[in-house]
Image (cartoon, rainbow, N blue to C red):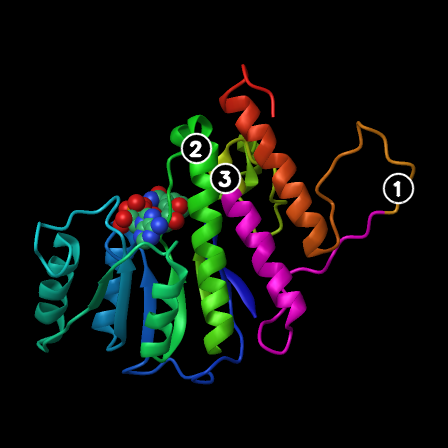
């Protein structure tokens, strides 16, 4: 089953470890849980009686020197205690998700039912200036998470995407619906979100027993191909990696038009 739970947020469900149970005590990994949306998600999960593990490097959230947890999560725990009348605690790891070996240790220590992936860089303007930073972090952490999930048998994944995957949408076409095509992005940030959505679809296609397919491949029958032919209509992960790299190179050229890649 797949659905959008909010504008730009895709949910991919599979028959993962823990089966279909989302009951009290279920353990959820929230990446970027110290951030703006992540802290609210963490609060909601705690109040519902779920166990929450947060991984965050606090690059965009505040942790006091020597403190065990970021300020936002200390407040989240207080609010959850107040709302439930029970002692609620978040397990917190101050860690960069780019460090895959450390991340895998966390997956091995906990029996995650689901990963809610909210960590990442999110500034449109910054991504235009520093595209490689966005590709390295956003693509790198998503890939590391999916690898760790694969290695430990976790298959439920909620991804905070972005409405930038749709690109500019004319006013008369608002509000954006599920049917609106994605990929018409105008910045590197949007493209990282779009590419991660495509990566998720490839994972679903490769392992339909564990994940459900989000969309089928679109065949490309038009030949011969000219330079003007649109790219991106790929039918396999290999083709998509090549297309993504082409787009990344274009972003680098746009950010630094003096140097040609
Ligand atoms: N805020 C919005 O309006 C909005 C809209 C659409 C999509 N999103 C997406 O939702 C997600 C959360 O957004 P937000 O507004 O809460 O952002 P945020 O910056 O407040 O939270 C992101 C968290 O991720 C952490 N982080 C960044 N890189 C990391 C890394 N390499 N390893 C570990 N932690 C890392 C940051 O420290 C931060 O706490 C983002 O992925 C964003 O792209 C946000």
Residue 107, picture quadrant: bottom left
Residue 222 circle label: 1
- Left or right: where does residue 246 sit relative to residue 112? right
Residue annotated with mark 2: 127
Verify CB contact (< 8 Å) between mark 3 and mark 1.
no
Q: Is mark 1 within 8 Å of ligand 1?
A: no
Query: Where's residue 221, x and y in %?
Result: 88, 47
Residue 127, picture quadrant: top left
Q: Which secondary structure, mark 3? A: helix
Of the two numbered discs 3 and 1 on the same chain, state the one appearing first in sequence: 3
Instruction: From the viewer's side, name the closer residue of 83 and 109.
Output: 109
Total marks in image: 3
Magenta run includes residue 222: no
Taking the view exactly as shown, the residue that stands out farthest to the front is 101
Q: In this picture, is 245 found above or below 13?
A: above
Query: Where's residue 222, x and y in %?
Result: 88, 41
Residue annotated with mark 3: 190
Instruction: State the extent of the magenta-drawn residues as a range.
Output: 192-220
Of the two numbered discs 1 and 2 on the same chain, state the one appearing first in sequence: 2
Query: Where's residue 154, x and y in %?
Result: 46, 75
Spatial CA span between label 3 and label 2: 9 Å
Q: Residue at x 11, y 60 (%)?
A: 74
Of the two numbered discs 3 and 2 on the same chain, state the one appearing first in sequence: 2
Task: Report whether residue 6 is seen.
Answer: no
Tag 2: Cα neighbours inside 10 Å, few (<14), some, or many (≥20)?
A: many
Q: Which secondary structure, mark 2? A: helix
Q: Which secondary structure, mark 1? A: loop
Q: Residue at x 67, y 49 (%)?
A: 240
């Amino acid at each position: 089953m797949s659905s959008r739970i909010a504008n730009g947020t895709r949910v991919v469900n599979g028959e993962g470890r823990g089966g279909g149970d989302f009951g009290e005590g279920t353990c959820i990994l929230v990446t970027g849980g110290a951030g703006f949306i992540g802290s609210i998600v963490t609060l909601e999960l705690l109040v519902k009686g779920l166990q929450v593990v947060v991984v965050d490097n606090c690059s965009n959230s505040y942790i006091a020197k020597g403190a065990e947890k970021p300020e936002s999560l200390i407040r989240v725990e207080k609010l959850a205690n107040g709302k439930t009348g029970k002692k609620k605690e978040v397990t917190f790891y101050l860690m960069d998700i780019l460090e895959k070996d450390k991340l895998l240790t966390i997956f091995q220590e906990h029996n995650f039912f689901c990963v809610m992936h909210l960590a990442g860089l999110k500034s449109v303007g910054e991504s235009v200036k520093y595209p490689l930073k966005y590709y390295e972090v956003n693509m790198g952490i998503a890939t590391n998470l999916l690898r760790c999930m694969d290695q430990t048998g976790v298959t439920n994944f909620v991804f905070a995407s972005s409405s930038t995957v749709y690109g500019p949408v004319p006013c008369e076409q608002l509000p954006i619906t599920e049917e609106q095509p994605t990929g018409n992005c105008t910045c590197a940030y949007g493209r990282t979100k779009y590419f991660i959505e495509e990566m998720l679809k490839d994972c679903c296609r490769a392992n339909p027993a564990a994940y459900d397919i989000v969309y089928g491949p679109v065949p490309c029958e038009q030949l011969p191909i000219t330079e003007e032919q649109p790219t991106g209509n790929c039918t396999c992960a290999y083709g998509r990696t090549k297309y993504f790299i082409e787009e990344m190179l274009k972003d680098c050229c746009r950010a630094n038009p003096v140097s040609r890649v």
